[in-house]
Amino acid sequence: MPTYQINVNGESRTVDVTEDTPVLWVLRDHLDLVGTKYGCGIGQCGACTIHVDGTAMRSCSLTLSQIDGKSITTIEGLSEDGTHPVQKAWKEVDVPQCGYCQAGQIMTASAFLDSNENPSEEDVKNAMHGNICRCASYTRIHKAVMIAAENMD
Amino acid sequence: MSTNNSITFSRRAFLRSSSLAGGGMLIGFNLFQACKPKVIAEPAIDLSTLAYNDFNAFIKIAENGAVTIFSPNPEIGQGVKTSMPMIIAEELDVAWKDVYVEQGILDTKNYTRQVAGGSQSIRHGWDALRETGAKAKQMLVSAAATRWGVDPSECTVSEGVITNAAGETLGYGDVVKDAALLEVPEEVTLKEPKDYKIIGTNIANVDIDKITTGKPLFGLDYKVDGMVYAAVVRPPAFGQKLTSYDDTEARAMPGVLDVIKIGGKVRAMLEEDPGFESKISSSDKIVVIAETTWQALNAKKAIKAEWENDLFMESTENHDQMLNGFLKGTQFETKRKDGDVKKAFAEADEVLERTYESPFLPHNCMEPMNFFANVTDEKIYLAGPIQTPAWKAGLVSKMLGRPEEDIHLEMTRMGGGFGRRLYGDFVLEAVEISDAIRKPVKMICTREDDVALGIYRPATKYRIKASIKDGEITGYHLKEAAINSNMYGLIPNFFPAGAIENYQVDVVSYKSNITTGAWRAPYTNFLAYAEQSFFDELAELMEVDKIQMRLDLLDKVKPDEDERIQYSPDRMKEVIKTAVEKSGWGTKPDNIYQGFVNYYCHNTHVAEVADVEIENGEPVVKKITCVVDCGIVVNPLGALNQIEGGVIDGVGHAMYGELQFDAGKPMAHNFDRYRLIRMKEAPIVETHFIKNEFSPTGLGEPTLPPAGGAIANALKAATGNRLYRQPFTKTPELLKVPSKEIIG
């Protein structure tokens, strides 16, 4: 099997996988970064959202060739100790119910806030609309993103 | 603080065979050493690294007084991993900041009812958990009193520190070794609610740090050394069975270790336990075993399987015809009968009859079904997301002909349950696979597998008929036509049972080969909408106030004279009146259309008011005011989350949820063709609790059923159209606002 170098959370990692392996499964099975979740496999639910050069993308629909030379950030690397403003807001609001989709929600929200300084309530709804929360913690997700927006550097 | 090794080893000294009521001897935590998790969750806080002394199956105490509390019940997102330990910590009298919570394993000797279902964990656990904490506290105080040579009554406790009359203090950690050896007291005094320091305060989800930093918590995250992955090829349609398959191509693919056939053991188990046959296919299945998830999923696509139609291949149209035929027929079983509804209808001034229809629903837990199994000669190791671990251990024991003592089962945090993980058909598959290959294995489903492997909420129809005579409701006849099973327990005795002299509930069901089961608030998730829509229509026909009509009916209920009536008319009236006040019922401007529902299920009384506004000519659900009487609110922060989630889930499924079948095949398999509610469609939920000191009841389900009815009644107010069929988006013409409303 071919060997790939990928840059994840500031580290260069080597993986031995077939070319068609989605980045999601490279992260989960080969690098033990299981914070990125499998939800649908077709880019519809957002549970597998990661940052590729700072942009939120669905890792279930990305191949290794698409991230060649790019920097990947997963939920494990969003901050060193869980103190990114979005993570802090999630804790303050106590967003999760089951918690399964929340890493993807946090990754979508953090990438959105990086490029949108003063989002309106409507902007936040539009940005988060692609991420499903089956427990329907939507009101808390919305509140947490609004709080995080205030505290972004 | 001491983390001295000698303390760790000395834990052995406290192995005890006597048991606490509701607690008991400690559990050995090294049973799983044979396949230790490779990915170990890092502790979020230092508390987890302390050396603890075992106290009982629920409690371990460190020398510095820090406490580990084991949460016995499975966590599916309903919050019991936080709220159950809170109840123990309250009576144990420790500071919450000193508490570290761990998930208990399946242990039927020391824990009772390790089930996540029916919104019952808190209700059933309330007395036992408080007693467990209080008895442990009493033993700790006794140990301290003995050391001081004083009477325990002279001691006081605050946050894990015992103080005597002379002002001397001992921490729980100082006396835990002595205390654990004492006899468990028979009687214990519990706190008065006014003295609660933890119960009633906002406590964050105990896994919040792990969730927000992506630590392994869920079944899909569970890994052990040497574990392989299994993807299962199941019949594509209900009613089919496997005839032959070709695995040549799959076997040649990278990472594929084996391709096997399973099914025989499940069929043998079904012969012994036929009650499970509506929960799992009896067909043979093909299993691809591979080194990684992707390799297994990929190779699965290369299996060429032939299936034959073994049973009738059902479609949504068949279900529709069958249920309509039942409603016209006479094959009903009567669940409750008061007076004579036929006579009431014959003598009525007016009769109203309406039919309400609902579709099949998949559960769509965000974490697809999966389970870990490692069947060895010595033990059967199981781990993963399961709402009913004890039931599954029993089935696995039957399936493999092994004693239940051989089974070690760990519950992982679950990415949603909603009833789907009550059944554990996936546990049986994982076990059959591991038994065949004798390796640690994780059975994994794709989303497509998960939807097609449903144990669905079946389609159901209700026909309701009521009679009016001299301005009174004199008769009420509810008929249920469902699939595979009918309403159970006390549901036939829910409101308006007891309020109407002539009252009857009849049920009938069609035996389908599509697997069906409980879905968050079974039956009531649709019945509440049907009955509460009907009440509104009845009030409109009688030209009376909709709220007053409900209150008048409640005045007639006498629960003291009928033990089947478990809802309280007084508590119901209070949630109704509070909802009227808090929602501004009847005082809103003309552009806000409201719909009202009061409901009782899962032992909790709820009233909800939906506010619908018109935006761009379309009615939009903007807000739900929700009033809840669940007795004492253990953790308001968690309770609000359940309530908001339940309401929005109820709105979402009433609006969009539907799974159709054609020739036995589900017509949607993933979120591209199956619509779940998303951020922009979610209304604001404003919650108000009724404050009282009744024992607490659950919140995982009771706020969902009223939501569909509240929005149906509000949408009627907005559009003039009564909705008789879920999902409401299936009839878009009925969601149009009359043109004058747009202009107005």
Image: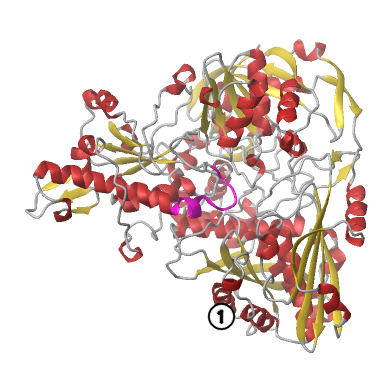
Residue at 20%, 32% in the rendered image: B2
x, y percent for residue B510 = 85, 48
Span colored in magenta: B115-126
Name the residue furthest left: B166
- Residue sitting nearer the eye, A105 or B29: B29
x, y percent for residue A4 = 60, 17
x, y percent for residue B488 = 69, 54
Tag 1 residue: B581
Residue at 55%, 54% in the rendered image: A141
Q: Is residue B118 magenta?
A: yes
For the C terminus of chain B, the image quarter is bottom right
Amino acid type at mark 1: Glu
x, y percent for residue B143 = 18, 42
Q: Is residue B626 in view?
A: yes
- Residue sitting nearer the eye, B265 or B20: B20
Q: Is residue B701 magenta?
A: no
Residue at 24%, 38% in the rendered image: B182
Which chain is indicated by disc 1? Answer: B
In this picture, residue B616 sits left or right of residue B640: right
Q: Is residue A69 in view?
A: no
The image quarter in which residue B111 lies: top left
